[in-house]
Amino acid sequence: MVSGNDMGRQATAALPDAGAPLAIELRGISKAFGPVQANKDISIQVKRGSIHGIIGENGAGKSTLMSILYGFYKADAGEILIGGKLTAIPDSQSAIRAGIGMVFQHFKLVQNFTVLENVILGAEDGGLLRPSLAKARRVLADLSREYGLDVNPDALIEDLSVGHQQRVEILKALYRQADILILDEPTGVLTPAEADHLFRILKGLKDQGKTIILITHKLREIMEITDTVSVMRRGQMTATVKTAETSPEQLAELMVGRKVLLQVEKRAATPGKVVLEVENLSVRDENKVERLKGVSLTIRAGEILGIAGVAGNGQSELLEVLGGIARGTGTIRLNGVELDLTGKHSDGQSRRAQGIAHVPEDRQHLGMIMDFAAWENVAFGYHHAPEYQKNALFMDNDALRADTEKKMARFDVRPPNPLLAAKNFSGGNQQKIIVAREIERNPDLLLIGQPTRGVDIGAIEFIHKQIVALRDAGKAILLVSVELDEIMSLSDRIAVMFDGQIMGIRDPATTDERDLGLMMAGVAGKAA
Amino acid sequence: MDRLPKWADVALVPLISLLLAAFFSAMVLLAIGQSPVEAFNVMVDGALGSAYGWGYTLYYATSFMFTGLAVTVAFHAGLFNIGGEGQAQIGGLGVALVCLALPWPHWTLALLAASLGAAAFGAAWAAIPAYLQAKRGSHIVITTIMFNYIAAAVIVYLLVDVLRPAGQMDPATARFPEGAKLPSLSDIPGLRELFLRVDSSGMPILGADGLQTYQNVPANVTLLIALAACYVVWLLLWRTRLGYQIRAFGKSEAAAKYAGINPVRITMITMLISGGLAGLMSINNVMGEAERLLQNSSEGAGFIGIAVALMGRNHPLGVFLAAILFGFLYQGGAELGLWTSIPIELRIVVQGLVILFTGALDQMVRMLLRWAFSFRTARVA
Amino acid sequence: MDYATLLQILDSTLRLATPLLLACLAGLFSERAGIFDIGLEGKMLMAAMASGAVAALSGSVWLGLCAGIGASLVLAALHGIASITFRGNQLIAGVALNFVASGVTVLIAQRMFGQGGRTPPLTGDARFNPLTLPFAEELRGVPVLGPLYAEVISGHSILVYLALALVPLSWWVLYRTRFGLRLRAVGENPASVDTAGVSVVALRYAAVAITGVLCGLAGAYMATALQAGFGREMTAGRGYIALAALIFAKWRPWAALWATLLFGFFQALALRPDVVEAVLRFKVPVPALDALPYVLTVLVLAGFVGKAIPPRAGGQPYVKER
Amino acid sequence: AEPAVIFDLGGKFDKSFNEAAFNGATRWATETGGTFKELEMQSEAQREQALRRLAEAGSNPIVMTGFAFGDVLNQVAPDFPDTKFAIIDMVVEQPNVKSVVFTEHEGSYLVGMMAGLASTSATVGFIGGMDIPLIRRFGCGYAQGVVAANPDAKVILNMTGTTPAAWNDPVKGAELAKSQKSQGADVIYAAAGGTGIGVLQAAADEGILSIGVDSNQNYLFPGKVLTSMLKRVDNAVYDAFTEGTEMTGGITVKDLKSEGVGYALDEHNAALVTPEMKAAVDAAAAKIISGELVVHDYMSDNTCPAATF
Ligand SMILES: Nc1ncnc2c1ncn2[C@@H]1O[C@H](COP(=O)(O)OP(=O)(O)OP(=O)(O)O)[C@@H](O)[C@H]1O
Ligand SMILES: Nc1ncnc2c1ncn2[C@@H]1O[C@H](COP(=O)(O)OP(=O)(O)OP(=O)(O)O)[C@@H](O)[C@H]1O
Ligand SMILES: [Mg+2]
Ligand SMILES: [Mg+2]
């Protein structure tokens, strides 16, 4: 699984200033999940009172490493030193005792408990709850005054926004008097403004002498707030450097292992007739909360409309309602024909029949059946297609397998084995199978969400080329991605979504990340 | 070594689970002061040692094939149907109503109509839990349990107050007309020689007319339908579009929705098929054997279907084999009750242990195997 | 229906509701911790057999009670091993253990007593005898309340009062203690408990053990208080009715009391079709009364009587590493 | 050939009906040194297999307890013309079947009189098993006896259920007994197989009297069971086993005269039965035997002069 370490260890565990006290030292940590070597012989040192960044692509092993430090996973090999002392951390209890607190990428909160209950869980002062709750209420009031961490202690978690839930997680760690705070991709769910607020809090904590480890894959954040930064790639630590002595370009290169082509080669768009018209489209989730609020947009043949925004601002709902997974109100016209939004023909089958293909954001949960073989997944969603049918009753499995082989060859899926179960392909190859399935249908409109999430750089380039090729063939494409770089380089027009609405539409040639970032935070007005 | 070879997963895991269940059954026997060896001999002799024995073994196996398939089909859609018992009993009601409705001219017609009645009633009984699961998210395990009890109450009411012929004391319907009598396997030319009646020295017994006499075995033509059902279910699941949709839905409801597979529709259709299969079982016992509807006609076969499906790894071929095994267990168990002082309940214990090891402790078996395989690979390496 | 008949039915209700209540609370602890348990029936049955057998042999109902709890705990441990340690399917494990219990109880009782899988009738100290509460006789004369106290409230075995006392106790444990907080959390989101440094496995085993103890009480009540001895399949589906009551009660202790009293009331009514007929002025088939708890549960599940949302992590094994 | 006996759902240790049959078979075995096969039913649908299996294995004669075997016996008997069958409580008209029925109304009349005489509240109870004409025959005879002893007495009648499960539901029996007690009954007659144990138990717990059925159940709760209505199923089984393969078909009626039914008097209830009671009951018995007194049989016309069901 682990590829050859072509970079070597450039600056292995770069030592911070000699003599400075170390908060944490990890030595030779390894961890495998079955066949996946998530961490391989990782060593790292973190100075007390510093903010240490960890960056790396998806799946590089960042969360795993930190979960080991927090005692959530057990390392297969390696040592942990806290404050210079060798410390065994077999479980989270030991980590907490050693003064470590962690805010996970996926929050670990009990949804129908109050904030107070969540905060004291596991840190109660005795057999009875009442004194613990009273104490927690006092401590929380102090903490919120000290760090600006406001949250209603009696609110139920399920009623809180993600940003507030994150505050609860931080409060949980502080309540346990953590000296070392680990935050795993804390800004992925935050608007830029919320992220700024968080960073102010973190700086405050640092000034109090606390040590902070911040996982992110946003280079901007690293440059802005960290003192030192470690780069991980495919389970290994490729470098640890002082932030002041590095540049985003160097970090990106360390992350992916070679120079990164940030720009996709493409000709200028030649937009044709309007393919998709969306007017006043709204979607509510199962809790009746409005997630998409009266969105209107159009896409022409031969153009890519990119949707930028912080995750959770309605992009997923937009894709889902267009792809026939969710229901909504408003109008959608495809090639001038109005689509059914609530009735019998509002499902994925009908959308496909009408010429909409959909590469979903979450490929492992939506796009394919992980236990099905590749050939079965190639029919997924197109199981009604005439070429896959033997007769009225039976599917033509042989034809399907032959077709799969062809698609695998054209899209360079490795290994090119139609009988292999989807779960046994790597993320990038899974994505290629899905993209092949959807693009080869030659749809009028392609919906594509997070096309390169967790995909290695080679596959990214390939998938980007396919998207551009489809555009050049005169098809309309709706691209949703949280990666601003991807949006900037692929889109012919960029729409920014915030809170279920389109904040504005920009030409990539005339905009920049700052402008988009403001709109993503809901600050800039609706100047389209 | 982390993954088991496929053959080990398919064949070795159930086999070892079965051996574990057998081992613990033997321990239970030893604990109550009985000899497992003797028990096993009695079971083999009683279930396989005579025409009478295998007549009953096949009869039970037929029922278990249907209920096993019913659990299997639902399982592939991610639905755990423990309502086979109730569906089979209500299916029996369908059979009884059809058989009693007309003086059937020929058994083939009666069989066709009764099959439809059985499947329709069984499916209808599965439809409400299915609807509640699909539309209202009520957990189908709990609703099907409830429906088992409700079915029992419905049957009691009907047998006591509605269907019981005047003057009859036991709660049962009237006997079905002669035209609705299914041929038993010993009536079928070609098969009948399997069911010769023999005397104690093993010599065939001659009738008054000098011809050999045959056992009147309960195994009947329904067995052939059960075999066909195994094949049809296999085709359905792995060759048809519907089967594709069922399996996809069972693996991931969210993905199925993305693919435009309607969850409500698939849940309903799958449970109708499942209930229909469970209902079909009652042609075997109600029409083929009892020839009238009795209380508790399915005698737990709906539950044994769970064990059969788990043991058979939810594959029709596996279900077929597991059904035969359980047919053996059931007939053999009945013989234990007769010829030894081991209570007949032993077979329920074995059934429970099989479900436990194949269904709930399968991870433990896999871990054991993985451990064993790691030795092998280590040596090879 | 006259007052005396009502009292008699209520008296009967309390007796019949007790095993349901104990089993329902048993299920409550397990399911609140995220372990679905359709094996309540089997545990009760095991406990009934063990307590009946030991009480018959020793002549002491207290030894019988201990044996019943012990036997139930053995099954609970098996359920825990299958569904916590080996992360097996909780529902299948429950179904399996019900079958095992159904068979094993008869095998053992037959082996021990040779009476077709029953225990001999229990007499004297081998049984829980009714307790007369203070002043029951003196207050009998008080209009309305006197007979209610004397007939319905007084005159039950100690286990009935224990079961009733367990309702506020369960509520208190669940909502007022550290253990209860953690228990509820582990049923909602085990990862939250795990990252808080508390063992998910230990908590779940503790919950399953409580379930075992309570089912043991329920089974022992069946064999040594409600009846005088064990008989095959004597729990007669009460484990499932308790499960139904648990859903009806939406996994809450006080609601569990009301739900089991309601279902006990139905069982009491099913014993008196004559009274039902007299009150309703038409004949209600007994099977309809028998089926009532199940029908009601289906209605609850269908959301017609308020939505029943089970603990969120219920039914799923806690898997940290795939 | 070895004889066999099949017990119905209550089980052979029901202390009542089936146990009486078992006792008869055991008595035959100890007296003759012979052995016999036995089977207990677990479910309704098993009856046919049980019959066939025993016949197949060469058991002869085969005795079965309970009316519920009637239908299947009608099917199975012709398949085994050389095997003799005996069925209790049911008439099956086949050449190789002997049907044994009892005049339960006569025996019940006697214990009804006893109940009427023993009751101080002039209210007595009857708890039947499964609600079928056969059990109503018990109840009807009992009610006639009660009224004969005390014309003002009230009889509370309850049935346990409508299915064979009613033969083995002691919880329900106990609850019904408690309910009857609360309605004033101070003697309760249980004609309900295994369910009766619950009735007798509850009556003993509540401090009232009970009347057993089929077997002599007086010993179960000494001093608490007024008497037992004896139905000599044991004799029927014993006779059938003794006749062996020579058994002839046809209907045998076992009545008071032939000591097929009666009431039990032993050391366990001696203190409860006063000489006056015994004298009155014995006098009635004599009249029934002589034909002077005819107890109405519910099954003759499905009506009862002394009770409504
Ligand atoms: N619990 C687990 N069981 C099995 N495999 C896991 C588990 N957690 C992570 N992995 C695998 O380990 C590898 C490293 O995952 P990890 O979550 O540490 O990456 P990451 O750097 O945090 O990625 P991301 O940026 O997406 O959060 C991945 O291949 C992942 O699939
Ligand atoms: N070739 C196709 N490509 C895409 N969608 C199709 C195709 N054929 C049918 N569909 C869509 O599939 C849905 C169901 O189609 P249809 O009723 O023909 O299927 P079916 O034969 O009933 O299949 P099944 O009952 O097995 O699902 C309809 O929404 C239809 O629009
Ligand atoms: Mg991560
Ligand atoms: Mg269709």
Image: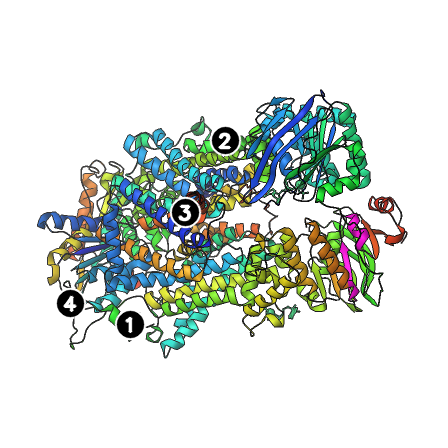
Distance, label 4 to label 2, CA atoms, is 71 Å
Labels 4 and 3: the sequence-earlier one:
4
The magenta span reads A471-491
Question: 10 Å neighbourhood of mark 1: few (<14), some, or many (≥20)?
Answer: few
Q: Secondary structure at mark 1?
A: loop
Callout 1, which amino acid?
A: Leu
Q: Which of the four quarters of the rendered structure image does ligand 2 lie in?
A: bottom right
Compared with C237, A85 (above or below) is above
Subunit under mark 3: B
Question: 10 Å neighbourhood of mark 2: few (<14), some, or many (≥20)?
Answer: few
Q: Are marks 4 and 2 on the same chain?
A: no
Callout 3, which amino acid?
A: Phe
Callout 2, which amino acid?
A: Ala
- Label 4 close to label 2 by CB (< 8 Å): no
Tell me the number on the disc at residue A278. Answer: none
Which residue does the numbered mark 4 point to in the structure image?
B203
Tell me the number on the disc at residue C165. Answer: 2
Give the left or right position of residue D117, taking residue B130 as reference.
left
Subunit under mark 2: C
Which residue does the numbered mark 1 point to in the structure image?
B191
Distance, label 2 to label 1, CA atoms, is 66 Å
Tell me the number on the disc at residue B357. Answer: 3
Distance, label 2 to label 3, CA atoms, is 38 Å
Q: What percent of the width, then of the height, locates residue D130? A: 34, 54
Q: What percent of the width, then of the height, locates residue B323? A: 37, 59
Subunit under mark 4: B
